[in-house]
Structures are given as C-alpha cells and as structure tokens.
Image (tube, rainbow, N blue to C red):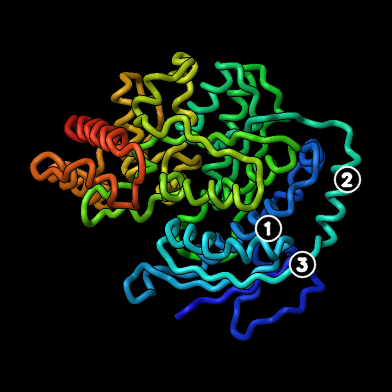
Amino acid sequence: MSYVFNCHLNGEDTFQVAGADLVPLHTKEKYSYTLWTRGKGHLNMIPRFFMSEAIDLFYISLMVFYADRKVRRILQPDAWTRSFKVYMPVLCLDKWNANKQLLESMLDFLTGDHWQFQFRERGFNKYETLRRDVISKSKDKLSATEFCMLSGGLDSFIGATDLLVSGHEPIFVGNYNGGKGVSVYQKKVIDLLSAHFAYDMNRFYQFYAAPKSGKEDTTRSRSLMFFLHAILLASGMGNPVTLYVPENGVISLNIPLTVHRSGSLSTRTTHPRFMGLLRQLIANLGLPIAIVNLYQFKTKGEMIRDCLDPQFLKRNVKWTMSCSHPDLGRYTGDSEPSHCGCCLPCTIRRAAIKFAGITDQSKYRDKKYKDPKHAINLKSYRLGLKNYSEHPMHPLMAIQQSGPITERHQDYADLYRRGMEELKNFIDSL
C-alpha cells in the first residue's frame, strides 16, 4: 500500500487528493517549525531573499520528515519498507519535473523506502512575500562564503573549533526537534564557541522543526531537514557558499556491526552515495552551494586527537551530546538530558574519547550496560566484533554493505578497519 500526502502552502490552494493526509505547512495545525518566526530580525540579516529552488527543497524536506515520522515501519509486511506518494506545490515546476527521478532515488536511498512525487506550480504565499520585502529593506546584513552545521554533537563541535582556530568565519546553523535534550546542548555549545573565540552571536542560527504527531523513531530523514535549513539560508548570501558538514567518516559509512544490527537506526545523510546524489541535485537546481565533509576519512577518535584546540576541547567534551535518546533519563528521575552511555552513538563516542586518551567527564546513565536492554546491546557489539576478528569480511567488501562506494575504495577500507579497531579496544576494556 502507498501512503499519500498532500501539501498545501497557502489558504487559497484548493487542490485535493482523495484519501490523502492533507498537510498545511502554512499553518501550525500539523507541523511546528520556526524558520520564519524565530528571531525575525536575525533572519533579516541574510543579504537576499532565498532562492526559489532552495525554498522548494526546504518544504520538500519538511514533508519527507512528516511522512517519515507518521508511518510506522513495524506495521509494514517486512517491518521496514514503506511506500509514499507526495503531492507537492513548488515555485520551480519545470526544474522539479526534470529532477523528479533524481529526488526520488536520493530519498529511496536515504530512508530505505519508496518515494513518488507529483508536483504542481504555485506562487509565493503571503508570508513569503512579506519576508522577501522585509529582507530587501533591512540594512544590517551578514556576509559569508562558508556555512557550518552545528548539531550540538561532538563531531560538529570539533568542526566548529577547527574552523575558528584556522581563521574561518562561517555562519553556523543548528536544528532540533522533539525533547529539550538536543537544544540544551546546542545552546551550550553556541555559548562556549562565542565566548572562547569572541565570535559574533549573530552568526549562529538555531531552528526547531517537528510534526505534531508521529511515532516512528528511526527518522532517517531528520538530518536532511537539518541540512536544508542551512542550504536555504546559504542561498540568500548572493555568492557561492561552502557548507561544511563535520562528521566522522566511520559513522557516515553506516556499516552494520552484525547481521542483526543493520545500522537501520543510523542516518545515511552523510553516506558518500547520498552526498553524491544531493550534490548532483543542488547543482541541477542551480544552487551555488558546495557541501564538504572535512573528516570523511577520519574516525571519531582521530577527530578528537587532531583537534586544533585540544585544551578547549578537553574542557568541554562533556557539554556535547551524542546520544540518540538524551531525554529518556526523565523516566528514571533525571531532571536534565544526558547520555544513556549504551546506544551505538554513545558507545562510539566513549570509544573515541578513550582512543584520544582524554578524561571523559560526560554524564552517562548506564556506563556498565547493566540495564537488560543495554546488556543486549553490549552482547550485540561483542558478537559483531568477534565476527570481525575471527571471520573478517574483506574491508573492500564491508564498505559496500550500506550503499555503493564508487571512489577511493582503499581509503574507505582503511577507515573502516581503524574505526572497528577503535570500537574493539573500548569494548575489550569493559
């Protein structure tokens, strides 16, 4: 069966699809997002109104995230794969019809589902017209040739630190959804970077976006929506922009640890295959934005070890958030978000900090995997690492498990091997 969604972006849109879930993104009925409303004056500091192609792609990312959250995978015949059809109003109809297959292929790979889009033309809605006019009249403007994602995680904190130490002047963009865990750490990281480097707070943007309903937790598309906030802002700079996406290369490969842990809960957003498709789409749309991951061939531990301001990093590792569920501690009495210590992102984080040889002052709710669910995780990690040691798959084959790698095969294979050794050394020490 196919799940059908119909997006509206203004009150005058009368397009209807029988049986479709109508999602009016111009209201707060089913979706809450702060792009247009959070710090209106701050938004007006972007030099130009956003390119129409970027606006379209931003709204598409919101709809993808809505569908991704709305439909539970466990209810599908294979307990995973869903089929979506999205009716989408766009400003650049011809370009989207020309790139429809590319968009669908990109999303198929990202979420592991089947996507179809049906586009129809629209004009600017009233809010967009108002914002365009206000931005054109605003006198306080920012200039930038570089943007950087700032998630509140350890990787992006290192990326931001390295850029600022090196004299770069990017605009940082953060995005959060759900509980307060991510936003608390994002705000702390922003304060730390601004104070330590005497960096202009106006060059930090932080947005919220989340559907008001939906129970699917895998949410592979969440990071795409995160990217699109930055791409949208970058399209208004009036010059070519490099967008930095700081993430260690091991996690971007999304390689399954065991046959039972396929990496399905992890995002594929920085996988080389997805990044290649996204770059191609951005180029086809005429957006002057280059996406770069400076750490594609580094493990997380190597990122920590090689940070350009090691003392600053050591003092503040504890203020970064890696956990996939930082708010779950409230069920055991914690008043503040924290790391569980046992999910795969937490485990990779702990392994990386151990590899780098620094003291980990982060708060972990279960450092010894005592909870029954956490104990199962640990057994799974050990099983995967035992298979890696005793029945190794050739690294050149292993790197292809989550998607095709078409270049620099040996570099990716070496990265995979170093990443597995980093994790193994930590698990063996427990």
Q: Position of residue 118 (x, y in %)?
A: 61, 72
Residue 34 against residue 230 in the figure, above or below: below
Residue identified by numbered label 2: 134
Q: Label 3 amino acid?
A: Arg
| Nearer to me, 300 or 332 | 300
Badge 2: few (under 14), some or many (20 or more) residues near its Cα, within 10 Å?
some
Residue identified by numbered label 1: 56
Q: Label 2 amino acid?
A: Val
Which is more N-terminal, label 3 or label 1? 1
Which residue is at 72% across, 79% downward? 15
Badge 1: few (under 14), some or many (20 or more) residues near its Cα, within 10 Å?
some
Badge 3: few (under 14), some or many (20 or more) residues near its Cα, within 10 Å?
some
Residue 75 against residue 135 in the figure, above or below: below
How far apart are the alpha carbons under marks 1 and 3? 10 Å
Residue identified by numbered label 3: 122
How far apart are the alpha carbons under marks 3 and 2? 21 Å
Q: Label 1 amino acid?
A: Asp
Q: Quadrant of the N terminus?
A: bottom left
Residue 248: image quadrant is top left
| Nearer to me, 180 or 8 | 8
Residue 269 against residue 409 in the figure, above or below: below
How far apart are the alpha carbons under marks 2 and 1? 20 Å
